[in-house]
Amino acid sequence: MLTPDIIDKTPSTHLESLQNLPNSFTTPDGTKDKRPKALVIGAGFGGLASAIRLSVRGYNVEVIEKLDAPGGRAYMHHQDGYSFDAGPTIITAPFLLEELWTLCGKKMSDDVILKEMSPFYRIRFYNGQTFDYCGDTQAMCKEIAKFDANDIPGYYKLMAAADKCKHLGFEQMGDVAFDGYKDLLKALPSFAKMKAWNSLYSLVASHIKHPLLRVAFSFHPLLIGGNPFSVTCAYSLIHSLEKTWGVHSAMGGTGAIVKGLAGLLHGLGVKIRYNSAVKQIRIENGNACGVELKAISEKEPGERLNSDIVVCNTDSAWTYKYLIAPEHRKHWKDSRIDKGQYSMGLFVWYFGTNKMYPDVPHHMMLLTKRYKELLNDIFKKHHLADDFSLYLHRPTATDPSLAPAGCDTFYALAPVPNLDSHTNWPEKSEQFRRSIQEHLESTVLKDLGKHIVTSKVTTPLDFQNRLCSYKGAGFGLEPLLTQSAVFRPHNRSEDIAGLFMVGASTHPGAGVPGVLMSAKALEKVIPHASTLR
């Protein structure tokens, strides 16, 4: 577990360091661009949002992306006429996206159409019972009554607690950078009011008695990489986020949002450089001063790019361990990184069918009988069990254009151990995929094997090798209380002036709202460009 040996750093200390860096760069027409230069590593949601905010604040921004297209974990695969969102598919708090369009003087609705889901998702338990989770209180009470009407009063109490956590944890602290212990001290009363030392599951169990309903109201932290039995009950705020602003899906898939954000950057004159992997972050006199790219040939040096600041949308553990030389890391030493507790891995099977399954909703959870025991296997024992729970995504329920006419696009996602399990995924992958297929055939997708026409699989190994995710963890450090806020990698690096972090593995954490809030938090720690001229 990470130790809280973090030292307060005031903005003035970093500002003085930044002011000593060169801030004159040559434009394509040969003239000098006097704006401070910012390099953003990674074109995921966090990187794209950060690039927009930095450009609006007067920086000359360039985005460096390893892949051939933007998105990162939200990349979009296209295969045999089918389109697959690689990762995030559930959009909550859409106003955080709208803010980015507003900053650019535009409306999100001109580029992206969001549709609210009803229900948000269907939960299918091992015994065939279903629970349609939505934002309507009366409808939720009817669903609860199918299991035990005596839990309805507890539902009201749980939602009241969730509302409090949303106000204290999301609205008040989501975009606070938690630069040091002063920020933590200010937040302690809010943590106390939320009783944040309790686990999410314990909060749910204190109000809900039916065992299956306890599952239905506690699995949500898995959407951001956390074990419900371990993460802080502050994450009950997810219930309130969904109820307040709804659960949305984008027409054209989440990739349509990524495309829209990339379009905003194009309008701002921000360049995104694709197929460009970073070899190292360059540091001079304790300041991040640019990056060195990986060379196409081992015999040639990689291209060097200069900048005043560097913003990383890459996995923070990977960044510190592999992109920054050890002598520059006082806090994020290898030993500290290795001792962290990391989120689970993800096994994702993307497949397209030559028929449609209209009884399957857009979002569906298929849960196995084991709950706590399976989570222990995944998070604590790092053991790949024979059983699994699934998130089944069928976007063609909302947008048929994501597949050929009369066909369906799916992905089935199973939480699995990260690479600490030492699972031989090249050997195990097909067997595990086959087990998922057989389970779907026996439950909600009859005769599936006869109708699959395209298929693709990603494992934790792909998260490590393709997305540079440490230990193949899908969400970076697990969002434990002792790995949150000031104890999570800071938005402003504790070690290096001019280096900043955004994305799932920094504060406030994973999930589209959290990642977008991390970019917003930058405005608290990065000086306006005018102060560096």
Image (cartoon, grey):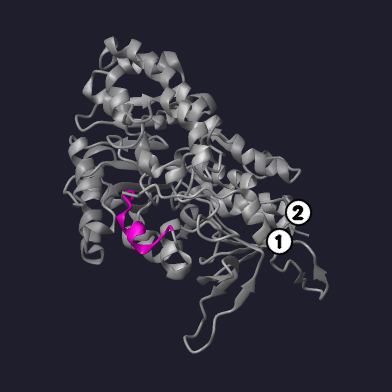
Residue 67 % position (x, y): 51, 65
Mark 1 or mark 2, earlier in chain:
1
Q: Quadrant of residue 369?
A: top left
Q: Is residue 87 left or right of residue 431?
A: right
Q: Residue 332 magenta-drawn?
A: yes
Give the residue type that dot 1 points to: Gln
Q: In the image shown, does 322 or 433 lie closer to the viewer?
A: 322
Q: Is residue 458 visible?
A: no
Q: Which residue is mark 2?
A: 531
Name the residue located 36 percent from the left edge and 16 percent from the top edge.
Answer: 155
Secondary structure of the residue carrying numbered label 1? helix
Work out whether 447 lies above or below 463.
above
Local crowd size for mark 2, using a 10 Å CA cut-off: few (<14), some (14–19), many (≥20):
few
Q: Which mark is residue 166?
A: none
Residue 177 % position (x, y): 55, 43
Q: In the image shown, does 308 or 366 lie closer to the viewer?
A: 308
Q: Which residue is mark 1?
A: 19
Give the residue type that dot 2 points to: Thr
Q: Is residue 485 left or right of residue 145?
A: right
Q: Is residue 154 left or right of residue 161?
A: left
Q: What is the span of residues highlighted in magenta in the rendered image? A: 331-343
The C terminus: image quadrant = bottom right
Q: Are marks 1 and 2 in contact (CB under 8 Å)?
A: yes
Q: Residue 395 magenta-drawn?
A: no
Residue 82 % position (x, y): 46, 54
